[in-house]
Amino acid sequence: MKVLQGTNRNISSYPYYNENLQVTMKGSDNEFSRFLLLVIAMDLSGNNLSGKIPEELANLLGLVSLNLFGNHLTGEIIEKIGALQQLESLDLSRNNLYGGIPSSMIALTFLSCLNLSYNNLSGRVPSGNQFQTFTDLSIYAGNPGLCGFPLAQKCKDDETNQGPNAVGGNEQKDNAIDEEGSEIEWLYMSMGLGFAVGLWDIFGLLFFNRKWREAYFRLIDQAYDIVYGALVVIFSRFKEHNAAA
């Protein structure tokens, strides 16, 4: 695919110029009959184009729709494609493109229609922004080298992270949980044992020492008398207050 040099000739002088223009955009055909210059779209699908995608394509900053479906394009998707930030529809399917999907495509925040199927793309599918919404697996079909969300194929670095290190990390986490559980069990056991020993000390003294036992029950009787007397006074005052009311 080559970039043609610009010309200052009026396009209306060409014999194939037509006032009606049909543009395939977001998977549907749209026909424009007026304000053709306002249509910022490029449909070069099915033209047997070959070669690499030109870097200069990234200079079309106002491009909204780009359709290169069904050609013989080779090489990698240009990294500069992320500069086309107005792009809403991109179809690069059924070519011979290879390499990874550029991470710069995350910057295409207006992109709502994407088709990269049936190329030779490989590597991780970018994540973030619009790519989180591209869950239709047909977008990436025919690219067995692609991996990562939303594809079932996991990337090698994911498998590495879930390998020995991940297993070791899980084992350490389980061991930490077991140790924490053991500490809690020992804490409760020691609390129960301390409570039992304390009660035995108190009741043992009361059982074997008569003086302590008599003093203890005398203290209980005094406490009962104090509490009972206080309750009697409170209820009597409460009744007097209700009677006066």
Image (cartoon, helix red, strand yellow):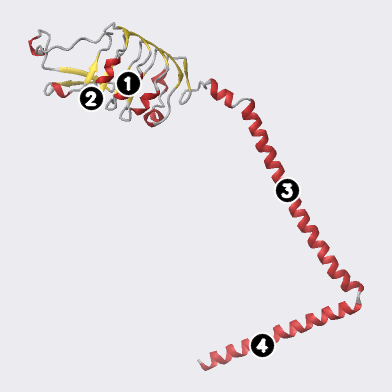
Instruction: Report helix, strand or loop for mark 2.
Output: loop
Disc 4 from disc 2: Cα separation: 92 Å
In percent of width and height, residue 44 lies at: 25, 12
Amino acid type at circle 4 is Val
Q: Residue at x 16, y 24 (%)?
A: 38
Q: Say whether residue 49 is left or right of residue 131.
A: left
Nearer the N terminus, badge 1 or badge 4?
1
> Looking at the image, is mark 2 or mark 3 earlier in the sequence?
2
Contact? badges 3 and 4 (CB < 8 Å): no
Disc 3 and disc 1: Cα gap in Å?
Answer: 58 Å
- Mark number for residue 62? 2
Query: Label 3 vs label 4: CA separation?
Result: 50 Å
Q: How many marks?
A: 4
Answer with the quarter of the image where residue 108 lies: top left
Residue type beneath disc 1: Ile
Against 139, residue 221 (above or below) is: below
Dot 4 or dot 2: first in sequence order is: 2
- Mark earlier in primary sequence (3, 4): 3
Tell me if I can see residue 28 in this picture.
Answer: no
Q: Identify which residue, 31 or 202, lies in the foreground.
A: 202
Work out how far the residue at label 2 is from the one at label 3, CA to CA, in angstroms: 65 Å
Q: Which residue is mark 3?
A: 183
Does the rendering let one see residue 166?
yes
Residue where numbered disc 4 is placed: 232
Label 3 packing within 10 angstroms: few (<14), some (14-19), many (20+): few
Q: Nearer the viewer, mark 1 or mark 4?
A: 1
Which residue lies under the disc numbered 1?
Answer: 81
Sequence order check: which comes first, mark 3 or mark 1? 1
**Residue 78 % position (x, y):** 35, 17
- Using the image as rendered, state which of residue 235 and residue 70 is in the foreground: 70
Q: CA distance from mark 2 to mark 1?
A: 12 Å
Mark nearer the N terminus (2 vs 1)? 2
